Amino acid sequence: MKKKTQIWVGALVIVAALLFLMVTSFTQSSVYYYTLDELATLDISPQQRIRVSGQLVKESVKYDPTKPLLEFTIQNSDSTYRLNVIYHDVMPDNFLKSEEVVATGYLQGTRFEADQLLIKCPSKYEPEETETAGGS
């Protein structure tokens, strides 16, 4: 083969390998995002990694820092669907102040095994302003 042809073939092989790596890494890292309403109507495989969001039911939170193990329940906006979530890691800061939780992991029957949590906290952390004496 001519040297020019060898260079083109080598370049095509490199480009094909890079495209293959990009496509496979993208499909492995992509995660479907569902609300609880959507999740209730779908048949999800236990091997499919998904992301689900819902409102935190604060009374359901149980945390054992010795394991560490965090268990809680999320629900949809009208409280018709609930999902028990288990997270085998340290409870995130401000978790108990959060209103909504986004969990990433695997649906195992009636519970969700989360390996990542994203908490959505209220936007207003500052206390209400009080008028000072003497006012200005």
Image: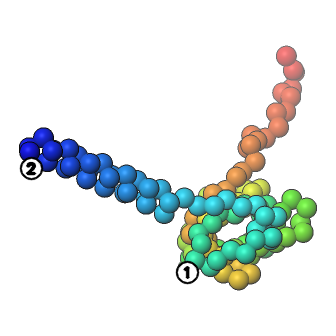
- Residue position marked by numbered label 1 in the rendering: 67
Q: Secondary structure at mark 1?
A: loop
Residue 71 in the figure: left or right of residue 129: left
Residue in the image at 58% along x and 77% along y: 47
Q: Would residue 101 appear left or right of 1 to someone viewing this image?
A: right
Q: Quadrant of residue 132?
A: top right
Q: Please report the residue visible at 64 percent of the width from the left and 77 percent of the height from the top.
A: 45
Instruction: Tell whether 111 sits left or right of 131.
Output: left
Q: Of residues 12 and 71, which is closer to you in this image?
A: 12
Q: Can you see residue 99?
A: yes
Direction bottom: furthest residue: 109
Q: In the image, is residue 68 above or below residue 117?
A: below
Disc 2 vs disc 1: which is toward the camera? 2
Q: Earlier in the sequence, mark 2 or mark 1?
A: 2
Q: Quadrant of residue 118?
A: bottom right
Q: Is residue 69 left or right of residue 2?
A: right
Determine whether label 2 and label 1 are within 8 Å by CB: no
Amino acid marked by disc 2? Met
| Residue 28 percent coordinates (x, y) | 48, 63
- x and y percentages locating residue 113 in the rendered image: 63, 76
Residue 119: mark in rendering: none
